[in-house]
Amino acid sequence: MQGGEGGGHTGTVPTSLLVSQSADAVDVPVVAAGGLRDGRGLVAALALGAEGVAMGTRFVVTAESPVPSATMDRFLKASVNDVIVTTLVDGMPQRVIVNELVHQLESSNPVGLFLRALRSGLQYRKVTGASIRDLLHSAFSMRKHERLTRSQMLMAANAPMLAKKAMTDGDPVEGYLPSGTVAGVIDDLPTCAELIERIMDEAEQTLEALTN
């Protein structure tokens, strides 16, 4: 259950409200996500009714992460104010780290957005081998259900390629960086084992402090 602080496609309800509402509404385990990075967050999520947590951005920024160094540097340097929600990547709200691509999208006029989207769609076709018919079918389906503009529906078809550019190919200028708000308070690269141990130690210390 991801609250609005989470990375990528997201909503507006904060994790603290969404988790507690969900825990009250369903009889299945709730896993909390969005804005969580340490043992204190784990304890808070459990107190809200979650059975566990998912920490996407925190584990992206680890020593074993396959994210290329140029992109990882953007995560480490981002402040909380650098992680925003935009609809210009694919027409739907996404939380991302602001970069050159986002600035270009936000400063473009409708014609510029459409031309960029068209170029992106053709790049997507070249890489995937999708036919024009396939692209049009996908685009018009998204437009029907999501009420997207023409440029947004073309960008939406190519959004996975833009994410791949930054997160796999190491181009944080032309690709986009989906990220939770917590990127703004992460400044280290522990191993996953070190991170898990740290989270558990902090959770135990937090629980002990609350009971004393």
Image: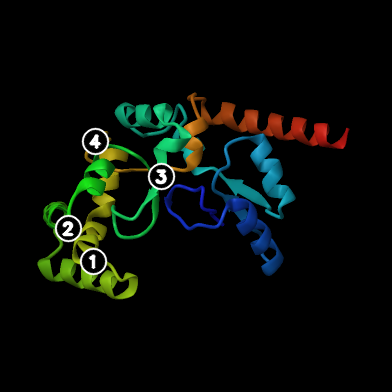
Cβ–Cβ below 8 Å for labels 3 and 1?
no
Amino acid residing under circle 1:
Thr
Question: Which mark sits nearer the N-terminus, 2 or 1?
Answer: 2
Label 1 crowd bin: few (<14), some (14–19), many (20+), radius 10 Å: some
Quadrant of the rendered structure where residue 130 is? bottom left
Cβ–Cβ below 8 Å for labels 2 and 1?
yes
Which residue does the numbered mark 2 point to in the structure image?
Answer: 110
Identify the residue at horizontal 71%, vertical 35% (top origin): 203
Could you give the CA–CA distance between mark 4 and mark 1, rounded to whole angstroms? 24 Å
Amino acid residing under circle 3:
Ile
**Residue 77 against residue 18 in the figure, above or below:** above
Check residue 149 in the rendering and tell me which mark sits there, or answer none: 1
Cβ–Cβ below 8 Å for labels 4 and 2?
no
Q: What element carries label 2?
A: helix
Which residue does the numbered mark 3 point to in the structure image?
Answer: 84
Amino acid residing under circle 4:
Val
